[in-house]
Each structure stands twice: as C-alpha cells, then as structure tokens.
Amino acid sequence: MTTTPIPVYPPLHPPKPEYDPSTSTYWPYFTKEEQQMLLNHPREEVTLEIGLMRSEIAEVLKAQQKDPCKTPQESLSTLYTIAVAARTIGTLVKYQSDYNQTHNKWDSFLAEAKHIALIRTGVYRQVAALGYAVPDGVLEIEPDLMPKPLSYSESLIVEAREKAAFEAAKTQAATDTDPLA
C-alpha cells in the first residue's frame, strides 16, 4: 500500500527584518534623549515612536498657528511634511499590529489555511499569469483542487443549457410585465 506524501507548503509570510528606529524619516529631528529612549525601547513596541511623531506634528501645527505660511510653496511643504509623518505613523501602526500579537488567536491559522487554499485551487497561478506578485515557492506546487476542464461536447451542452435558461428568463420577464397577459 502506497501513501500519498503530504506536500510541504511554503510559508505565507517570509521572515522580516527587525525594525530599526534610526531609519525613521524623523530620526534627525528627535533630541538626543528621545533618540536614546527609542533605542532602549523594545523593538516590537513602536508606541513610543508613534507618540514622538505625533508630538512633532503637533509642534508643526502650533508653529503654523503662531507664524502662518507666507507663500503657497511653504504651505505645500508643510502639508507634505505632515502627510509623510501621518503615512509613517500608519506604517508603524501596521508594524505594531503585525508583530505585537494583537490579533485574534485564530487569525494566523485562518491566514495559513487561506494561503494553502489559494495554492491548491490555482489562484496564485492565475494571479501570476496576470503579472502580479505571488509568495515565493507557490508556483512550484501543482494545484490539486482545480476543476477538470470540460470536453468540447460538454462545453456545448453547458452553453446550450445556459442559452435556454436565459431565453426562459427573458420570456418570463416579458410575460410578467405585459399587462394584457
């Protein structure tokens, strides 16, 4: 009796490098004490950096209230700075969400099950054929849950049934709306 080997699926999320706060856009603008606090803070906890960046945004807004921009270019530069800071805060919040185990205990299991289903149904192959990126290693595994293609005669039968159902629905809709019928 032969047993079918259980396939080994590649991981959904490859390991990511640790976050380094000194790569932040705003690192040069933090004081030495704030930089030291960030370096001593646990790597997986980015709440401190989020708080510092929010305080930097607040300082910019306070400065704008005291001394408003005089040219449109200054206004655009200020707006751009705040937008970059907000985007960075959003990235940090996502980082914290992904790495700080704040998810429901079933989320990782469900994500892995979905990943395996996408491999087994051939969805990743279709996505890759359209030119989109897919996780590494998924195209080497043959999908085993894809429906087998219909033969030519079977496809003609399906097409005829669909056409007949469409005509029946069209006739039914016409009689339903005809006041004389």
Image: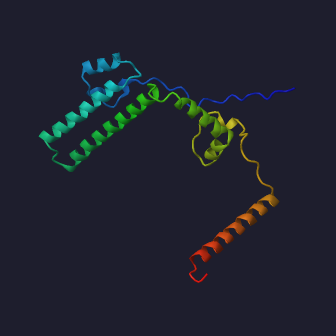
Quarter of the C terminus within the rendering: bottom right
Q: Measuring 69% from the left and 35% from the top, which residue is drawn there? A: 140
Q: Quadrant of residue 155?
A: bottom right
Residue lying furthest bottom: 180
Report whether 53 appears left or right of 64: right
The image position of residue 138, as x and y in percent, is 65, 36
Residue lying furthest top: 40
Q: Quadrant of residue 134?
A: top right
The image position of residue 67, as x and y in percent, is 13, 41
Residue lying furthest right: 1
Q: Measuring 67% from the left and 68% from the top, which residue is drawn there? A: 166
Report whether 70 appears left or right of 25: left
Above or below residue 58? Residue 46 is: above
Q: Measuring 24% from the left and 42% from the top, which residue is drawn there? A: 78
Q: Quadrant of residue 51?
A: top left
The image position of residue 34, as x and y in percent, is 27, 21
Quarter of the N terminus within the rendering: top right
Q: Measuring 46% from the left and 25% from the top, which residue is drawn there? A: 101
